[in-house]
Image (cartoon, rainbow, N blue to C red):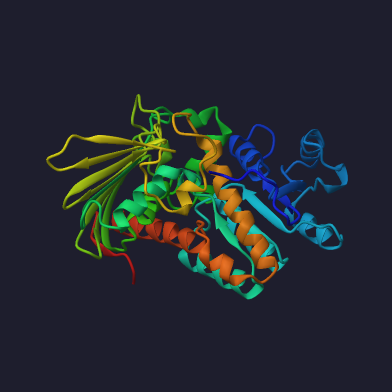
Amino acid sequence: MFNEEMRSEQPIRWAMVGGGRGSQIGYAHRSSATRDGHFTLVAGAFDIDAERCRDFGTNLGLNPERCYADYQTMFAEEAKREDGIQAVSIATPNSTHYAISKAALESGLHVVCEKPVTFTVAEAEDLKRIAQEHGRIFGVMYGYTGFQMVHQAREMIQRGDIGKVRVISMQFAHGFHSEEVEKDNPGAKWRMNPEVSGPTYVLGDIGTHAFYMAQLMTGLDVERLCCTRQSFIASRAPLEDNAHVMMQFSNGAVGTLWASGVNAGSMHQQKIRIVGEKASIEWWDERPNQLSFEVQGEPARVLERGMGYLHNDDSAVSSDRIGGGHAEGFFESWANLYSRFGTVMKAANRDDQATVAATWFPGIDAGIEGVRLLERCVESADNDAQWVKYYE
């Protein structure tokens, strides 16, 4: 069970770039990061408008002098303070991630960044190099991987409960953008703009979540893939609002990924199904406290979070915040990740590399693989769904 006692070390002095007034994701970061005492919000560059930033930040209880007009000023001014920030979370449009992350790392800050972390693999690998040179932690906000039953599935697959993995079905296919909602929704509009969103829309925005979930559960590498992309709302071209990807994995398994914003009538439909020789496992983010376990020739069963019959690793058990039967959700998943980010950041500050190495968290390598997926999908789709090698 999760230990709510405050850690002996002082909270990490933390700031945000982006995530200002009206941002659902900004609220998710703040609510989750501060929940377990690992972080305390002391500064922010929440908005490109200085007045709005200051008004919003002071309403959060911050000193107005620490509500900055831009991230460059924040990093420079905070570096002058004895109580300056030690970490920053980046909740801005995709096109800004690389520059802000690079500046933060070079300022000696730990980073938590939204995904995709960059437009290119080369940029993402550059961030990894800089983070290593400065001894900083780089976390990537794959927020669904804080759910306990995801880690239950991982453990069961890794210890062979389903046998050799044969088929991996990944999907994240909602229906909220089945019409041209971006006309009146600024939060959606930038996602359909290639200058801001990057070379993809739904693949980068939601497909990477399902892809990383499957990587985490199975530990398998993709060998090659082919991709088709569609823009059913014509004004979104060249960015896709629907995509299908076929994959071949290193152990001979095959997989499919469906990412869509036009699955009319659907809420999320983020489902990961892993089919093995003996059994299958399926997790659905709309029912995150349950895991379907289906053994061939036996009645299908549903495993419930928090129950003693689970034989799961520390990633799951230590994250339970209340007994089984009570629903835990999105904010608990994010808080579980921020608890891990806090643990490894504090360890890095005292040069405790053993704790960093022993603690699972979605780091820069997870971010790199998400960007690599997007590069390969665009390459394939732009060449008439040609099969391409995943690693060159």
Is residue 346 positioned above or below 285 on the image? below
Viewer can see residue 197? yes
Provide residue 244's location: percent of width, then percent of height: 28, 46
Q: Is residue 57 left or right of residue 345?
A: right
Viewer can see residue 207? no
- Residue at the extreme bottom: 133
Q: Residue at x 58, y 34 (%)?
A: 186
Q: For the C terminus, give its image quadrant.
A: bottom left
Q: Is residue 67 left or right of residue 236?
A: right
Is residue 363 positioned above or below 18 on the image? below
Q: How many marks?
A: 0
Provide residue 218's location: percent of width, then percent of height: 32, 56
Provide residue 141's location: percent of width, then percent of height: 53, 50
Q: Residue at x 65, y 44 (%)?
A: 36
Q: Quadrant of residue 290?
A: top left
Q: Is residue 107 left or right of residue 249?
A: right
Q: Is residue 331 left or right of residue 279?
A: right
Near-viewer residue (213 or 203): 213
- Residue at the extreme left: 297
Q: Residue at x 56, y 53 (%)?
A: 95
Q: Residue at x 57, y 66 (%)?
A: 356
- Residue at the extreme front: 308
Provide residue 65's location: percent of width, then percent of height: 87, 46
Is residue 22 positioned above or below 81 on the image? above
